[in-house]
Image (cartoon, rainbow, N blue to C red):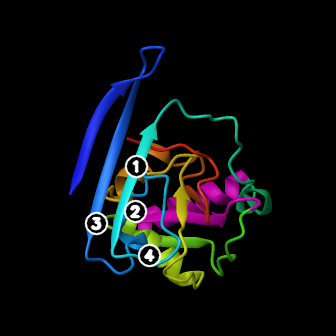
Amino acid sequence: MSLQRTYTNELGKPKICFISFRVGIKNPAPFLPYKVGLYPTSPIILSVLFLILTESNQSADMAKCSFKLEHPLEKRKSESSRIREKYPDRVPVIVEKAEKSDIPDIDKKKYLVPADLTIGQFVYVVRKRIKLSSEKAIFVFVKNMLPPTAALMSAIYEENKDEDGFLYMSYSGENTFGSFEM
């Protein structure tokens, strides 16, 4: 069950209170909406989460992308266009750990993801690749934003793909950027 209320702050700008209730799930962390900035760190039966969404601070830089540093732009462009031509129903994604994150490194950075996969399903893949225990939280960012878990990878790709044709995502064990997408 979810409730959503809209309020205004002292400057008259809207802020939203999003409350999510998950009942009967022993380990709710993988199922919670990723725009919620508060995650349980241990298994619980009932989780009540509150989120006050206010203006986000975009001053934090996204993790330095080592893939971009290792490969020149022209090579990345040609590779992504070749991939898109060969696999039109797939999305080329680069996944890297956010700087200063205490979460394990991922063994593979490049992924060819089915276009109809949701962000939540892809986060599950990332979680398995880094062998993250189920009670630990993981946050996935696209351009310093937490994408909605129900969003399709194809939609996120079209909105956020880089000039080289890849979708760049970073992950962290904590909400380091403090921003989200609605």
The residue labelled by disc 4 is 124
* Residue type beneath disc 1: Phe
Q: CA distance from mark 3 to mark 1?
A: 12 Å
* Residue type beneath disc 4: Tyr
- Which of the two marks, 2 or 1, is nearer to us in this view? 1
- Residue at image position (70%, 41%) is 60
- Can residue 44 be seen here? The reply is yes
* Residue type beneath disc 2: Ile
Q: Are marks 4 and 3 in contact (CB under 8 Å)?
A: no
Q: Earlier in the sequence, mark 3 or mark 2?
A: 3
Q: Is residue 45 left or right of residue 84?
A: left
- Can residue 88 be seen here? The reply is no
Q: CA distance from mark 2 to mark 1?
A: 21 Å
Q: Are marks 3 and 2 in contact (CB under 8 Å)?
A: no
* Magenta residue check for 25: no
Q: CA distance from mark 4 to mark 3?
A: 18 Å
Q: Earlier in the sequence, mark 1 or mark 4?
A: 1
The numbered disc on residue 169 is: none
- Residue at image position (37%, 64%) is 32
The residue labelled by disc 3 is 22
Q: CA distance from mark 3 to mark 2?
A: 19 Å
Nearer to us in this view, 123 or 156 = 123
Q: Is residue 29 left or right of residue 71?
A: left
- Which of the two marks, 3 or 2, is nearer to us in this view? 3
Which region shows up in magenta?
73-100
Badge 1 density bin: few <14, some 14–19, many ≥20, Cα 10 Å: some
* Residue type beneath disc 3: Arg
The numbered disc on residue 119 is: 2
